[in-house]
Image: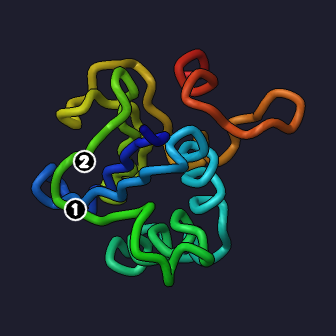
Amino acid sequence: MGDRANVVIKTGPFMHDAFVVYSHWAGTELPQLVQDALNSEHAKSRDGDPAYQARILVSKIIPAEAHGEEGGWGLSHRIEDNEAGRPVLVVDLDDKEVWIANEDAINVSKNRWSFDDFREIKRPEGRPLTWEHLAVNG
């Protein structure tokens, strides 16, 4: 039970340079949370500075009200309990790209965007950015 999803944040040239942000209850919202985080002035100002940008993204993706809570969000070096069939979003700070991967964090789709392109993906009628929306806009 839950609404689980993962975002891989890759801070260097290799996948072992990555960590994972896990959401137990906000998986449906994760694409929108990532887009909002990348659109923040702090994250934009740290393009090319992976250590700071990674911390800023985590701070923006995990809602402030969750910071004092025991559950709901996690950090790991592996994909956690992902919702069945749901892809993984990879934020590649080294190449400044966002892409969709399978649960092994292997890019298996053409859905790949530069940071600027991902920041600009338009949502239909002001609704949140969804996994389905990303699937058709890649």
Question: Image height check: is 45 above or below 93?
Answer: below
* Label 2 crowd bin: few (<14), some (14–19), many (20+), radius 10 Å: some
Q: Are marks 1 and 2 in contact (CB under 8 Å)?
A: yes
Q: What kind of residue is marked 1?
A: Ser
Q: Nearer the viewer, residue 114 or 79?
A: 79
| Residue found at x 34% / y 71% | 50
Q: Nearer the viewer, residue 75 or 137?
A: 75
* Label 1 crowd bin: few (<14), some (14–19), many (20+), radius 10 Å: few
Q: Is residue 117 left or right of residue 85?
A: right
- Kindly state the secondary structure of the residue where label 2 is placed: loop
- Residue 21 rendering spot, x and y as whole percentages: 36, 58
| Residue found at x 53% / y 63% | 61
Residue at label 1? 76
Residue at label 2? 80
- Residue 80 rendering spot, x and y as whole percentages: 24, 47
Q: What kind of residue is marked 2?
A: Glu
Question: Image height check: is 115 above or below 66?
Answer: above
Q: Is residue 62 left or right of residue 40?
A: left
